[in-house]
Image (cartoon, rainbow, N blue to C red):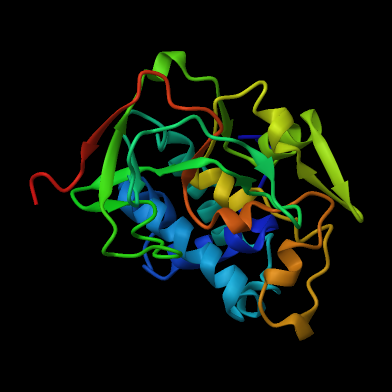
Amino acid sequence: MSPRESLLDTFPGRLFIDHLRSARVLPAAFVGDMGAEHLIEGADSVVGSYLYSDACLEVADLDVDDPELQEFNAAGLAALAKLSTFDSPQIHQGKIGELREPVIVNRNPLSALPGGAFWTSTPISDGKDSWTVCGENLSREDPRWEVYFDIDSVRVARVDSARDWIELIESHPIIAGSCKYPDWPAIAESWDAVHLSAAGLLLAHPTISTTRFVASDVCGEAHSQAGPYASVADWSAVSTAWLHRPPNAKLRSAERDR
């Protein structure tokens, strides 16, 4: 991630820091001891709060020069940088037959999400992954699959920061109004997959310093759409959008031992 980016300059980032502060312990000790499950679950949950609640109002006026907040910011970024969220296997949830080559299109209206992608999440522990801890748009009755693939052969665009996301969009932009979106069919010519990490999920949003939050909007959904680039908020969770079939893919039921 870019060393100039700060969790304190996005609403999901501030909400994540507020989540860390709630433990009432020293930031370096707390964040350093957090496992992948707590980091991913924290990132997933605050994006939901950003979009669908009035939580932005609670952190809109934070003093970003406060030494304690700066310490939490540095410790949080360090913990997120160490977190590995793209490996084989990934998890797919839903009914699936033969794994076919995705047909990638731009959604109408334009979206930060690719149409036609094959989606996977990051496994966390037995029965848990970055989708299940998010809980959005999932049916608990749908089967879960481990998706094994040749990670050395994957052309993966990793989104670990706002800069990564902007560079991906700028490589093949499509514009609606004053906002730039990814041109997904064009991006699919260069990449097999796009992976959004926990850090990217917290950082790739309109910055508070440049994009005004209108208090009358109450929730952050309007703010997420007000920047010069599409926000990753609609991704909702740490996840991977496959623009092509994973190389040498093999599926195995994730429920086999349950």
Asked whether, in this view, residue 81 is left or right of residue 89, the answer is right
Residue 69 percent coordinates (x, y):
57, 60
Query: Which residue corresponds to the image point at 40% horizontal and 34% vertical from the top-left?
Result: 84
Query: Which residue corresponds to the image point at 35% horizontal and 60% vertical from the top-left?
Result: 133
Q: Is residue 109 above or below residue 252?
A: below
Q: Is residue 34 visible?
A: no
Asked whether, in this view, residue 41 is left or right of residue 192, the answer is left
| Quadrant hosting residue 25 | bottom left
Residue 122 percent coordinates (x, y):
37, 42
Q: Residue furthest top?
A: 153
Q: Is residue 195 above or below residue 149?
A: below
| Quadrant hosting residue 136 | bottom left
Query: Which residue corresponds to the image point at 8% horizontal and 45% vertical from the top-left?
Result: 257
Q: Residue furthest right?
A: 177
Quarter of the picture holding the N terminus: top right
Q: Is residue 161 visible?
A: yes
Residue 241 percent coordinates (x, y):
52, 39
Count the marks.
Answer: 0
Q: Nearer the viewer, residue 101 or 253?
A: 101
Residue 209 percent coordinates (x, y):
80, 59
Q: Residue furthest left?
A: 257
Q: Is residue 234 above or below residue 28?
A: below
